Image (tube, rainbow, N blue to C red):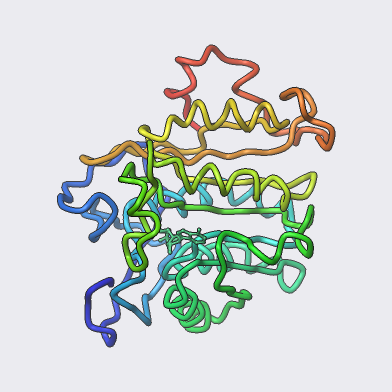
Amino acid sequence: MAGGDSAAVSAVEGRLSELSTNSGEKGLPRRGKSSSGRTLNTAQIQLVASHPEVYEPCDDSFTLVDALLSDKAQLLTLKPRLCMEIGCGSGYVITSLAIMLRQLGSGTQYLATDINKHAVETTQATLEAHGVHADVIATDIVSGLEKRLHGLVDVVVVNPPYVPTPEEEIECNGIASSWAGGLNGRQVIDRILPAVRELLSERGWLYMIALEDNDPLDICHLMNEKGYASRVLLKRCTEEESLYVLKFWQDAASGTNASHAARSPRSESSWLSQLPFRSLWHKNA
Ligand SMILES: C[S@@+](CC[C@H](N)C(=O)[O-])C[C@H]1O[C@@H](n2cnc3c(N)ncnc32)[C@H](O)[C@@H]1O
């Protein structure tokens, strides 16, 4: 999509798939089409709009949607009242989520943000083309929305800019801000996490993509200290990167600062508290 003809319509496929697929894609770390040979279209999203500065869905986007699909039954049981995506890009993920949870009807609302105004426009077009609705707002993470959304969001999904880059690249406008993550790829992630903790309801879940270089175990430790349990919902290795989809939820048994912690969902347990760390990265979701 990015860099392509705006009239072009490309089909982007997400599928429930095996935990590890190989993509032969080379080039920029976060760009280009997946070559992982997807066949089963559980969520098929048409990219009806494009812009050279908007991130084209790629293996990380597909991996996040696949993880959400693998958790669909739990999401339907949760009956989230408010779902939110931070950094919505083309709208592929929030549109997939809204379609996935369509049967919940108007009881579930959707919200998406992106720092890039072209991404906001593209997401709106993608949602509209698929007959689903979300409020889409151009802002830095959730800036300006914190008070209104405090403790109200039941599901947050994030495919953040996670590629280790020079710090200056984060400040660049344009497509680089889609992937530029600064030192260890953590600079934007480390701003997103505290913001998300303020947004999540007591029963809320966060689904976030992280790269091996981001030190996902450290991310889980940090969240654990704030009262969040976590697990690897999906791991996928491409030729270029090892992607993890991490799922977080409040857990009274986790951390030292769990003053707002709710009861742990019965189906979940904290792998941080139950498993030796080395084994965590081999555990299937
Ligand atoms: C890797 S792309 C993911 C796009 C889309 N969610 C997907 O999975 O295909 C990251 C997105 O985050 C957005 N982004 C980067 N920094 C942001 C910030 N500080 N606040 C909000 N969005 C941001 C970028 O513009 C980009 O659209």
Residue 43 percent across, percent down from the top left: 45, 63
**Residue 181 or 70: which is nearer the viewer?**
181
Q: Which residue extends farthest bottom?
A: 7
Residue 194 occupies which quadrant of the picture? top right
Residue 54 occupies which quadrant of the picture? bottom left
Q: Residue placed at 75% from the left, 33% from the top? A: 266
Residue 202 occupies which quadrant of the picture? top right
Q: Give the answer, above or below, for where 197 lies relative to 220.
A: below
Q: Residue placed at 29% from the left, 80% from the top? A: 9
**Residue 279 or 144: which is nearer the viewer?**
144
250 left or right of 170 in image:
right
96 left or right of 49 in image:
right
Q: Give the answer, above or below, for where 27 lies relative to 220.
A: below
Residue 242 percent across, percent down from the top left: 33, 36
Residue 41 percent across, percent down from the top left: 38, 62
Q: Residue placed at 77% from the left, 28% from the top? A: 257
Residue 145 percent across, percent down from the top left: 70, 65
**How many numbered discs, if any?**
0
